Amino acid sequence: MSRLRADYHTHTIYSDGKATVMDNARAAHEKGIKTLGISDHGWGHGYFGLKRKRKEDYFKEIEEARKVFPDLRILISIEANILGADGAIDLTPEEMEEFDLVLCGYHFGSKIRNLSDLWMHASNALHKYLGIGKNYVTRRNTEALLRALDHPIDVLTHPGDKGPVEIMPIAKKAAKRGVMLEINERHHYLTTEQLKEIKDLDVKFLLSSDAHTPDAIGVVEEAYKRVKASGLDVKKIVNLKGEE
């Protein structure tokens, strides 16, 4: 059984997951999860994003899983990609309206539109592997996430994972915009230190498995340990069992 009544962030073979929509639904059902988000990467991911031409198939498979598991609420979701420092994302507002839930995060694999995007990826890689330019990339990444929050998204995924950010201004804007911040099991962000910094803000959180295989659905033990270590009030986490 899982700690979660809802796992809003899972991937399938429509992006970089290893199983089908039906496989994920079956695993969630068996673990006692009541709501499942099928949230494959948006089409702006250059390597394994959901292809626009397969969107209708994606929707159809989720509808089929809903029929097989009528007691499981399955959301047609997507993890949009932040494309660059300007905060642009890979879905239009009209496209976002087609989904029950829109998650959004920065990924190295997002498609490069211009030299600015290329430099953002390159500078984050230089910091990650060589430890240089921390102040610059932190400022640039923070600007990107702040601007992404101007879009009608529901969840900001793993802030800080692909490059350092200043979490306080991001959390303040997320609270103002009504966007939930994700505590991600797979990528280890939000970190304990980030949570300690923002735990007293009026912002809501999700615990997410970010599962890429069915066995990982609902698994958030490492993320939950970070929550407890930070002192974050678990009532601010919207998808724990027993919490509304």
Image: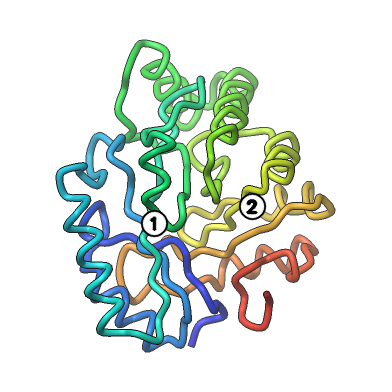
75 versus 176 height, above or below: below
Q: How is the image coloured?
A: rainbow
| Residue depicted at x 30% and y 28% | 111
Q: In this picture, is 32 found above or below 6?
A: below
Q: Amino acid at mark 2?
A: Thr
- Secondary-structure class at tag 2: loop
Q: Which residue is mark 1?
A: 77
Q: Residues within 10 Å of mark 1 (few under 14, many from 20)?
A: many
In the rendered image, is residue 130 in sight? no
- Seen at 21% across and 67% down, the residue is 61
Q: Nearer the viewer, residue 17 or 187?
A: 17
Distance between the Cα atoms at labels 1 and 2? 24 Å
Give the percent coordinates (x, y) of residue 117. Answer: 40, 19
Question: Do we see residue 102 in this rendering?
Answer: yes
Q: Nearer the viewer, residue 228 or 41?
A: 41
Closer to the camera: disc 1 or disc 2?
A: 1
In this picture, residue 66 sits left or right of residue 206: left
Q: Secondary structure at mark 1?
A: strand
Q: Which mark is residue 94?
A: none
Q: Nearer the viewer, residue 210 or 136?
A: 210
Q: Residue at coordinates 35% horizontally, 63% vertically from top-left?
A: 38
Residue hosting label 2 = 191
Q: Pinpoint residue 1: horizontal percent, then vertical percent.
A: 48, 88
Q: Position of residue 192 (x, y in %)?
A: 69, 55
Taking the image as shown, residue 12 lies to the left or right of residue 202, namely left
Number of marks drawn: 2
